[in-house]
Amino acid sequence: MRRRTPAPPSPLPQRHGVDAVRLRLPAAGNWATVREHLVERLTGAGPGVVEEMVAAGRVVGADGRPVAPDAAFVPGMFVWFHRELPDEVAVPFEVVVVHRDEHIVVADKPHFLATTPRGSHVTQTALARLRSELGLPALTAAHRLDRLTAGLVLFVVRPEERGAYQTLFRDRRVRKTYEAVAPYDPELTLPTTVRSRIVKERGELTAREVPGEPNAVSGVELIEHRAGGLAHYRLRPATGQTHQLRVHMNTLGVPLLGDPLYPAVTAPAPAGDFRRPLQLLARELEFTDPVTGGRHRFRSARTLGAWSSYADWAARNAQDPQ
């Protein structure tokens, strides 16, 4: 089998903690120039955008030199460019570094901040912020948390060690503990383990349970409940399906407070509206370091607002958007 030629390093530095886009030209094609291929390939950029980027010298080759508008199409050639960043409302909450060494960074992510660049969330992500703030341009994420979920995320300092840490999550060798606030149901027998098959189709906002072999397993415990029908839960996912804990709590009849998708999809909050944080927190990460062999246990210091002060949380949710 013929080995694929590895990509050379990017000749462009990061911008706001975000890597340049790398494209490899096809092995064959009828394009006379690189520009013609990019215009056809990047149709989503809009009329004239690619031509302007090439003319301005913002598309470069492996040597860092701008690709000329009349540069011949070369099969397998690599090119790089920075995409125009979307306008993003700043998430006004800090990413707290819980631990940092030469191998890993463990960060305590706030609600509303995405873990890694995706879609309309690019610079307002934990990864982009940490790369810039810590001066670690090669930092990568070993796993992800939903944008609406707060808590601990593991990042890897050295790219060559990323696979070792990602394998921990793939092989379920990380003990993850979450906390959540949801209604209290005295008829619900806890602790319990929820097992089901969860699927999430591309383009769909919500995940759903379907018949079949379970691929999602969650342990649910009651920590405490209060008069008024509110409860504080401890959740331990044994698997990592998208929205797994949110789906399983909804299945139990106690959907998480602040959840805009379960049990029903509600209108998205306006940009800049941070009043309705999902009451889900990745509280602890515990694992044996695959590189050093050391045992780690990290804990988030964040609180869930609906539990620490429900009256304040409810009052904020009752206010009109600013």
Image (tube, rainbow, N blue to C red):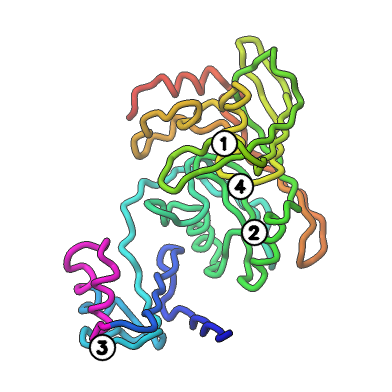
Q: Is residue 125 left or right of residue 233?
A: left
Q: Which residue is mark 4?
A: 108
What is the x, y in percent for residue 255? 56, 25
Residue 86, compared with residue 302, is above or below; it is: below
Of mark 4 and mark 1, the one earlier in the sequence is 4
Q: Between marks 4 and 3, how big is the CA–CA gap?
A: 47 Å
Q: Quadrant of residue 154?
A: bottom right
Q: Which residue is mark 1?
A: 210
Give the magenta part as a residue range. 30-52
Question: Residue 105: which disc?
Answer: 2
Q: Is residue 261 left or right of residue 254?
A: left
Q: Between marks 1 and 2, how big is the CA–CA gap?
A: 37 Å
Few, some or many C-alpha atoms within 10 Å of disc 2 (few <14, some 14-19, many ≥20)?
many
Q: Which residue is mark 3?
A: 71
Q: Secondary structure at mark 1?
A: strand
Q: Residue furthest front?
A: 212
Of mark 1 and mark 3, the one earlier in the sequence is 3
Q: Secondary structure at mark 3?
A: loop
Q: Between marks 2 and 3, how big is the CA–CA gap?
A: 42 Å
Can residue 6 be seen in this snapshot? Answer: yes
Which is the main secondary structure of the residues drawn in magenta? helix
Nearest-to-viewer mark from 2 and 3: 3
Few, some or many C-alpha atoms within 10 Å of disc 3 (few <14, some 14-19, many ≥20)?
few
Nearest-to-viewer mark from 4 and 3: 3
Nearest-to-viewer mark from 4 and 1: 1
Residue 155, compared with residue 137, is above or below; it is: above
